[in-house]
Amino acid sequence: AQSVTQLGSHVSVSEGALVLLRCNYSSSVPPYLFWYVQYPNQGLQLLLKYTSAATLVKGINGFEAEFKKSETSFHLTKPSAHMSDAAEYFCAVRPGGGNKLTFGTGTQLKVEL
Amino acid sequence: DVKVTQSSRYLVKRTGEKVFLECVQDMDHENMFWYRQDPGLGLRLIYFSYDVKMKEKGDIPEGYSVSREKKERFSLILESASTNQTSMYLCASSLVAPVSTDTQYFGPGTRLTVL
């Protein structure tokens, strides 16, 4: 069975600072990994996904994530936070060949002036 | 753009009522999913469907059923609503077969309150 752990249910950064949201996964087979964002009162929107091609994945709104097999991690980063990045972020894993996404518990990002 | 719509943004029902949550997608996707979202628990899969009239249980199917009579529509049914089913319900759809890297597209959610 696969699982996802997101460290930190709440993260607060200053505008312009680095954003780092952590995600560790567990999967018995090579995984596909996803980051989704949820803005207030909206559904989830895909930020980026890793599908066994390049280990550094670039997504929308300046976000990127690096797949590190040795660390079983897929952390999300953005060099400079913007107020509009305030949202909840979810990491998700799907085993290669599987059909179900397993989500982490989410990280609420707060961006302060 | 893929569009996934849900019939209601907010719904208030009484304990014991039968509740229908409707989801429609406009991109001819084979797969459709129902999740519930609760604070601190993330999203949990209730049911999914990979074709018309086909369904599979997710991680928390108890107390729920689903119906998929047409490809574009996937309904979640609470046969007898209970207070512990108060939650945000999210519908999603994705293209192609289950074995794929394809993206799931989400609707805006229905916040259900059971009194």
Image (cartoon, rainbow, N blue to C red):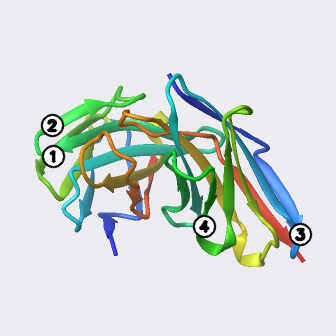
Q: Which residue corresponds to mark 2?
A: B54
Q: Which residue corresponds to mark 3?
A: A17
The residue depicted at 19 percent of the width and 56 percent of the height is B73
Mark 2 against mark 1, which lies toward the viewer?
A: 2
Q: Tell me whether circle 3 and circle 1 mark residues in contact (CB < 8 Å).
A: no
Q: Residues within 10 Å of mark 4 (few under 14, many from 20)?
A: few
Mark drawn on residue B110? none
Mark 3 against mark 2, which lies toward the viewer?
A: 3
Three-letter code for the amino acid on which mark 3 is drawn = Ala
The residue depicted at 75 percent of the width and 59 percent of the height is A77
Q: Which residue corresponds to mark 1?
A: B68
Q: Quadrant of residue B57?
A: top left
Are the residues under badges 3 and 1 in a single subunit?
no
Are the residues under badges 4 and 2 in a single subunit?
no
> Is A83 placed left or right of B81 in the picture?
right
The secondary structure type at the circle numbered 1 is strand
> At which x and y percent is residue A26?
61, 28
On the question of residue B18 being in view, the answer is no
The residue depicted at 60 percent of the width and 38 percent of the height is B41
Q: CA distance from mark 2 to mark 1?
A: 7 Å
> Is A26 placed left or right of A110 in the picture?
left
Viewer-side residue, A30 vs A47: A30
Q: CA distance from mark 3 to mark 1?
A: 46 Å
Of labels 4 and 3, earlier in sequence is: 3
Q: Which residue corresponds to mark 4?
A: A40
Are the residues under badges 4 and 3 in a single subunit?
yes
Mark 4 against mark 3, which lies toward the viewer?
A: 3
Q: How many marks?
A: 4
Three-letter code for the amino acid on which mark 4 is drawn = Pro
Q: Quadrant of residue A24?
A: top right
> Is B93 placed left or right of A17 in the picture?
left
Q: CA distance from mark 3 to mark 2?
A: 47 Å
